[in-house]
Amino acid sequence: MPAIEALRVGVLCGGASPERPGSLASGEAAAKALAEAGLMTELIDMADTALSALRDRIDVALLGLHGLGGEDGKVQGALDTLGIPYTGSGVLASALGMHKPTFKTLAVQQRMDTPRWTMRQPEVSIESTINTVRLTLGFPVFVKPSSGGGSLAAGIARDDAELRALLTRADGDPYTEFMIEEYVPGLPCTVGLVEVEGRLRTLPVHDVETDREFYDYTAKHDPAQRREHCPSILPAPTTENMQYLARRVFQMIGAHGVLRVDFLATKGGRVTMLEANTLPGLSQRGNLATMARAGGIPYPELIKHLIRTAYTKPGYLP
């Protein structure tokens, strides 16, 4: 593994994803921390940079990309082809983590609890979809993109009319595929895993309380709209179960270097898994950095650990 101090680090962020603002915040925070540590760092907005131009500009890519095109394996495959090392998971794990229906199908096969769901197929009418939801899931339900994050284009439907409104609005959205999920009221929780000196560290569980209808985009970006706890306020057996499940997910999708797994914990004791994030946000106030600090890893060290994951991948990673 080369010395980090000798590397030209390209922090890739931005792009054309609907999650561009969050990605820019991640990239800027990480680049600032690296520059302050004396590393050769370049912040690169992928909205106006061709991947092929990176070969001679950087030695390693720190991925701060979010959402479509950056978190789903496409950039990872291009960097593999170019021979540029990059942080985090490879193509397969990125794609599996990004596409929620496929991820949830794998979770069910592994006997992990995840909210029941159905798909909004573009070729099927909205009225037929509503009938399917009524017969298979019942109300309320949660609607969200199959490949998206940050609670963008997501919402709760409590009856036919609200679901019709959400699906009608979704037809004009940049996301082309939507999932309709059993609504589970509960405490949003997340578990981070990060490779430190060649070993996977499981970080303390982070939870969030909010008075909003759910942990939506506003609550995620306005600290006044949420109350965070890390370590979690939940009982130790519950958080230990989440940590155990997060490690199982890491193995299940073949993740590498870093992963964040999101859960809901109900008052009745149910722990249900929502999704996996192979490129967690990198801002200093973000969940991953918060969990790392609670686990004794300062933010600058977290970013350096992530860069090292680019050089600890197996010789072939799908």
Image: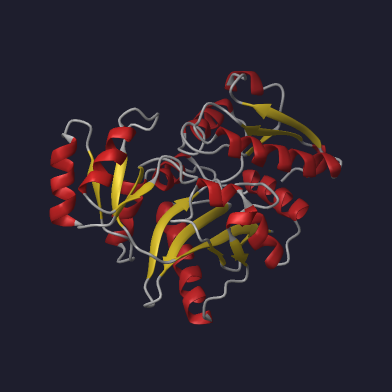
Side of 12 relative to 76 (left or right): right
Q: Is residue 137 above or below residue 218?
A: below
Q: Is residue 201 above or below residue 100?
A: below
Task: Tell me which residue sits at (47%, 44%) in the image.
Answer: 149
Residue 285 is situated, as x and y percent measured from the top left of the image, at 68, 53
Q: Residue 318, can we see it?
A: no
Side of 138 relative to 87 (left or right): left
Task: Tell me which residue sits at (19%, 50%) in the image.
Answer: 133
> How many callouts does the rendering have?
0
Residue 240 is situated, as x and y percent measured from the top left of the image, at 51, 75
The residue lying furthest to the front in this view is 161
Q: Is residue 255 above or below residue 112?
A: above
Residue 16 is situated, as x and y percent measured from the top left of the image, at 52, 26
Residue 119 is situated, as x and y percent measured from the top left of the image, at 24, 44
Query: How did the renderer colour the structure?
Result: secondary structure
Foreground of the two, 70 or 186: 186
Foreground of the two, 72 or 315: 72
Task: Tell me which residue sits at (46%, 34%) in the image.
Answer: 68
Quadrant location, the C terminus: top left
Side of 298 relative to 176 (left or right): right
Q: Residue 16, can we see it?
A: yes
Foreground of the two, 265 or 2: 265
Q: Report which quarter residue 124 is drawn in.
A: top left
Task: Tell me which residue sits at (67%, 55%) in the image.
Answer: 289
